[in-house]
């Protein structure tokens, strides 16, 4: 469904962030992208929806090749790729509802969105999603009144209301506490399963990644070093990705504990 | 899930900025009414404005062909006088503002001194430069002395206030550390306070030099010296090319000052 | 080197010899410039008048007090005009400043090498020239009156407002803009959802701040004939009607204090 073909990104400074990355993601697969900071995880995700322009290579979403699209056509394709951000990236001075509805911007015209006159079906869908993540009662709160976990839930709603085929998730848990991190990861993975979405989750918490995903990609210096199931992440593999360190403790935490079931909101 | 059912199909509107409906409408209607009233009372002589467009065009064209030469003597003298007033008043104004700023900072000065200094600042800020200039010209006679005094006085209000605010918001711990070493008040100011506020003082002073120059260009209108008198004459005689030349010089000097102050500020911080 | 080794003893100095020499030379030049400036000023001053100043000041004071209170009935319209000049001028300036600010901000300008310098030039040139000069110019062009005052205030304020606004635009959180563009929003939608909400508080602050300054400036525009209370001030000064002058100055002072209070209140409510 998503295919990257020899994707290269070289920054103006000369840093090569991605070195001919080849990757194929089938329909409905949730995969985690791990690697040390500076490995090019963020760049890879941003090259897919061209928030960062790739230097060379191709990105296929279904049958459409994204890197050659005009800006108008790119906007239409971006609607099929929901994105979730590290620091939530909500527009803080807008309400929760406006933030969620901003996911529909690619579908409505300028004046309609400017006057906040979204189609009723969009508003209904927004309420449904907010209810699903347990925030329906917060719809008219301003985004900066929310806690970190709540903000990320709103970010998830914003991505899902686009009705995407693919989720690009950039460090969803980086600024959250461990418990909320798990809840958010679980929520994302559940929603992907419910809707049959593929997702690329960029994450640096290896244990958390192993807990939730079906496939792990290890990135180091802009090249793929590992591609396989989470069980395949042995101490040796982690050493090649991250460098020398005692990895046993990290791996041991991977026991499926279902103690904290997703608590709705608050 | 019953909560959700009540929400589905409901219209959604952005919650208004002002919650109370009557207040929102009163403010909006009041504002519109004011605007209408304001527009009604400005009686614009449109035919005069229309005639003026031709002169406006001439003035804009004058900018492409400014005349620096035919009144070069007046322009030169006026500019030098403006610059002299700027320099002298900035030096004196800054020198006086520093003790007043110290006096107007509550964490440095005792209450009586604080009140006196704050009063000086309030008076200086409330009086417009041009009004002060009118009074000083009446008292001291025409010439740059009145302009110099005006600008010095205005500098005190501006600089002391902002500097005092900076002193009040400085890092207490550093200042306390110096005090703890047994320093005298003057030593304490010199070692504990001065290093903290110095960059801000320099930045504000440079900014004030810039303002003083711009203000010095208008003081001539009321006879307090500087380029303003020449400019006024140029407008009176409809010599747009000379006026354009003067305005261009002012703009270039202001730009140069901003550029220089940017460099100095970057070096200080 | 600030630390010198002299006869085995380390001597610490704040500056090295060369540096301290430079330092003194700089001070010397500064003092010389100031002395020159002062000498120039004093040369073009008639010192006889200056020595006479206390007597004249006293004279003016006795003539100006008490203010002619009944004159206030004639000041209603001028005050209303002054308020209008400031308010309408600010509104027009804001309308014009917003596009200029967007063109001048590094992250929103359509072209860095053509449009941005032009926008910056507009900002610098309107800012550098005092509203009184703009008023002089406009009176020469469109004739005296309130309208010239409104336009003068508007032009003078464009640069000021646009400068503060474009600095606010350059400081926005780019990740919010990125998030909105990732949804497939168009250029204008990104503006309306990603950028405008972030700069709205700055916009409101600038508007009120500039309105406060404009009230001050519009009180004196009348001196050159651009309407408002300054006209009365100017005519009273011309006939040396000092009791009227003192009353007008009191009114101006009151207007300045009130406008500062209003703007502080409004800013407090917004932020």
Image (spheres, rainbow, N blue to C red):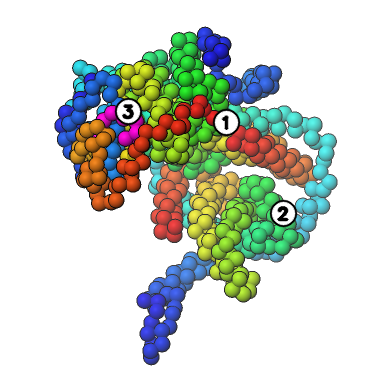
Locate residue A171: give its quadrant.
top left
Which residue is located at x 57 percent, y 57 percent?
Answer: B170
Judge whether residue C116 is colored magenta: no
Q: How busy is the neighbourhood of tag 2: few (under 14 within 10 Å), some, or many (20 plus)?
A: some
* Residue B140 coordinates in the image, percent (x, y): 67, 57
Give the camera-side residue of C172 and A237: A237
* Tag shown at residue C7: none
Task: Look at the numbered disc 1 and give the secondary structure of its residue.
Answer: helix
Is residue C187 at all visible to an observer of this figure? no
Q: Are marks 3 and 1 in contact (CB under 8 Å)?
A: no
Report which residue position mark 2 lands on.
B119
- Give me the C-alpha separation between circle 3 and circle 2: 60 Å
In the rendered image, the vertical position of residue A213 relative to residue C50, given as above or below: above
Residues drawn in magenta = A209-217
For the view shown, which residue lies furthest in the bottom direction? C7
Tag 2, which chain?
B
- Give me the C-alpha separation between circle 3 and circle 1: 48 Å
Q: Are marks 1 and 2 in contact (CB under 8 Å)?
A: no
Task: Look at the numbered disc 3 and give the secondary structure of its residue.
Answer: strand
Report which residue position mark 1 lands on.
C89
**Quadrant where the image shows the C terminus of chain B:** bottom left
In the rendered image, the vertical position of residue C54 relative to residue B235, given as above or below: below
Locate residue C214: give its quadrant.
top right
Report which residue position mark 3 lands on.
A168
Give the camera-side residue of A119 and A73: A119
């Amino acid at each position: 469904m998503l295919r990257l073909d020899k994707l290269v990104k070289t920054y103006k400074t000369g840093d090569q962030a991605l070195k001919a990355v080849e990757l194929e993601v089938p329909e409905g697969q949730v995969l985690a992208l791990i690697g040390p900071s500076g490995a090019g995880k963020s760049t890879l995700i941003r090259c897919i929806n061209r928030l960062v322009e790739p230097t060379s290579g191709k990105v296929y979403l279904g049958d459409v090749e994204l890197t050659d699209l005009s800006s108008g056509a790119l906007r239409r394709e971006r609607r099929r790729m929901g994105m979730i951000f590290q620091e939530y990236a909500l527009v803080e001075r807008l309400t929760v509802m406006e933030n969620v509805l901003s996911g529909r911007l690619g579908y409505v015209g300028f004046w309609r969105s400017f006057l906040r006159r979204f189609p009723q079906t969009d508003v209904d869908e927004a309420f449904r999603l907010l209810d699903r993540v347990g925030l329906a009662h917060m719809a008219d709160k301003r985004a900066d009144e929310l806690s970190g976990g709540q903000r990320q839930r709103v970010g998830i709603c914003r991505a899902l209301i686009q009705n995407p085929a693919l989720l690009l998730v950039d460090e969803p848990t980086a600024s959250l506490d461990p418990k909320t991190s798990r809840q958010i990861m679980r929520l994302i993975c559940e929603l992907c399963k419910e809707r049959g979405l593929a997702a690329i989750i960029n994450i640096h918490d290896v244990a958390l990644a192993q807990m939730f995903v079906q496939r792990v990609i290890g990135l180091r210096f802009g090249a793929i070093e590992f591609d396989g199931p989470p069980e395949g992440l042995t101490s040796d593999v982690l050493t090649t990705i991250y460098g020398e360190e005692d990895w046993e403790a990290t791996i041991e935490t991977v026991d499926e504990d279902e103690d904290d079931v997703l608590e709705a909101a608050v | 899930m019953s909560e959700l059912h009540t929400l589905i199909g409901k219209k959604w509107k952005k919650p208004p900025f002002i919650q109370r409906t009557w207040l929102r409408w009163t403010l909006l209607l009041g504002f519109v009414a004011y605007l209408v009233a304001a527009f009604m009372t400005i009686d614009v002589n449109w035919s005069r404005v229309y005639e003026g467009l031709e002169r406006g065009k001439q003035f804009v064209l004058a900018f492409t062909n400014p005349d620096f030469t035919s009144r070069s003597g007046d322009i030169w003298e006026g500019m030098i006088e403006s610059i002299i007033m700027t320099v002298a008043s900035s030096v004196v104004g800054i020198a006086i503002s520093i003790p007043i700023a110290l006096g107007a900072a509550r964490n440095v000065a005792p209450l009586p001194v604080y009140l006196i200094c704050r009063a000086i600042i309030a008076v200086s800020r409330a009086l417009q430069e041009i009004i002060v200039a009118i009074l000083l010209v009446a008292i001291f006679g025409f010439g740059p002395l009145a302009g110099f005094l005006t600008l010095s006085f205005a500098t005190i209000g501006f600089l002391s206030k902002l500097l005092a605010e900076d002193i009040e918001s400085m890092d207490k711990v550093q200042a306390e550390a110096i005090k703890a070493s047994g320093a005298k008040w003057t030593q304490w100011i010199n070692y504990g306070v001065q290093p903290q506020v110095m960059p801000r003082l320099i930045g504000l002073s440079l900014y004030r030099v810039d303002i003083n120059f711009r203000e010095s260009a208008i003081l001539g209108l009321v006879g307090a010296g500087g380029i303003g008198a020449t400019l006024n004459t140029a407008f009176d005689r409809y010599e747009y090319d000379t006026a354009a030349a003067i305005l261009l010089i002012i703009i270039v000097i202001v730009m140069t000052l901003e550029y220089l102050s940017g460099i100095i500020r970057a070096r200080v911080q | 080197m600030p630390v010198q080794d002299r006869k085995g003893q380390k001597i610490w100095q704040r500056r090295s010899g060369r540096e301290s020499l430079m330092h003194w030379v700089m001070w010397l030049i500064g003092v010389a410039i100031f002395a020159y400036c002062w000498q120039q000023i004093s040369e073009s001053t008639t010192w006889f008048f200056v020595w006479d100043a206390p007597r004249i000041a006293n004279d003016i004071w006795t003539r100006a007090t008490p203010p002619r209170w009944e004159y206030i009935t004639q000041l209603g319209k001028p005050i209303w005009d002054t308020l209008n000049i400031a308010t309408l001028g600010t509104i027009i300036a804001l309308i014009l400043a917003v596009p200029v600010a967007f063109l001048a901000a590094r992250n929103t300008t359509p072209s860095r090498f053509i449009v941005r310098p032009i926008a910056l030039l507009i900002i610098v040139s309107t800012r550098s020239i005092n509203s009184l000069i703009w008023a002089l110019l406009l009176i020469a062009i469109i004739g005296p009156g309130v309208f010239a005052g409104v336009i003068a205030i508007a032009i003078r304020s464009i640069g000021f407002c646009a400068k503060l606004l474009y600095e606010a635009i350059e400081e926005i959180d780019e990740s919010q803009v990125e998030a909105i563009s990732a949804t497939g929003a168009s250029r204008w939608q990104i503006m309306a959802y990603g950028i405008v909400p972030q700069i709205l508080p700055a916009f409101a602050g600038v508007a009120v701040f500039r309105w406060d300054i404009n009230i001050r400036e519009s009180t004196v525009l009348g001196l050159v004939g651009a309407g408002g209370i300054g006209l009365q001030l100017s005519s009273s000064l011309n006939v040396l009607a000092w009791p009227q002058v003192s009353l007008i100055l009191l009114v101006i002072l009151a207007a300045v204090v009130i406008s500062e209070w209003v703007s502080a209140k409004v800013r407090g409510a917004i932020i």
